[in-house]
Image: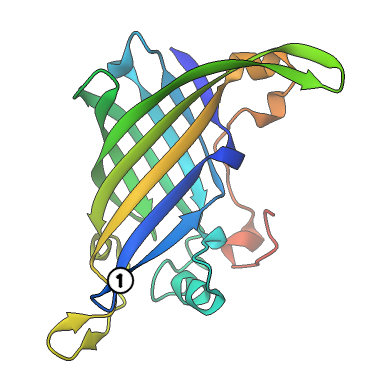
Amino acid sequence: MTSWSFEPGHTEAAFRARHMMVTWVRGLFKDVHGRIEWDRDDPLSTTFEGTIDARRLWTGEADRDEHLRSADFFDVEREPTINFRGRVSERTGDTHFKALTDLTIRGVTRQVTLDVAYLGQWATPYWVGDENRGTMRRIGFEATTTLNRHDFGVSWQDEMPGGGVVVSNEIALTLDVEAISDEDMRTVGEDAAIYSPRELPTEARAGSPDAGA
């Protein structure tokens, strides 16, 4: 199997929730780091893992973002990361798969099933100034699922007249991943970009907004 590290600049986790029974609110996590063990000729042996910095949540509205980071929702002061680890369990098409994934939010771990699409591979030269240091192979995936946020203790709610709720219980998730071959990164001298599991410093776990920046 070939090891591939997420390229954080082109990797993100997005979520979508119903608001006030009539519209959608969308949010992003852009600080996503991880690794895939992937071989196009042996996709059912694929494994992956990753970490999302929940403190970097963004919906485009500062007050809402602050509320979502609070103990009512993600409680990032106590649980600053969302973690996942899984494996491809079933092939459903030429480039489509199911993956069983242990997802941890707010310190609560549940198994979820992802629908995964492999988007392809491309190789490009890696230039530093006028020097071509070699070839960088990149692969892409899109993974989607829907989960009940209450299963993870993300349980703030307010009721509306007529039996409605402010925030939907079911949340749609999409993970878009671009990953680069670890072997290629070593060849071109970018070893520091190769994924290793990250442990946030103590001050980050205490909720410092500048920790781990």
Q: Residue at x 18, y 24 (%)?
A: 92
> Horizontal placement of 213 versus 103: left or right?
right
Q: Where 161 falls versus 67 (above or below)?
A: below
Q: Where 185 falls versus 154 (above or below)?
A: above
Q: Residue at x 48, y 18 (%)?
A: 121
Q: Which residue is mark 1?
A: 23
> Horizontal placement of 205 versus 59: left or right?
right
Residue closest to the eye, 149 or 17: 17
Q: Quadrant of the N terminus?
A: top left
| Colour mode of the rendering | rainbow
Residue closest to the eye, 205 or 158: 158
* Residue 44 x/y as whole percent: 27, 18
* Residue 100 x/y as whole percent: 25, 35
Q: Amino acid at mark 1?
A: Thr
Q: Residue at x 87, y 17 (%)?
A: 130
Q: Quadrant of the C terminus?
A: bottom right
Specify the farthest residue to the left: 162
Q: Secondary structure at mark 1?
A: strand
Q: Where 116 falls versus 62 (above or below)?
A: above
> Horizontal placement of 29 versus 109: left or right?
right
* Residue 167 x/y as whole percent: 29, 74
Count neighbours of disc 1 (C-alpha within 10 A) and say few if under 14, some if 14 to 19, many if 20 or more: few
Residue closest to the eye, 2 or 145: 145
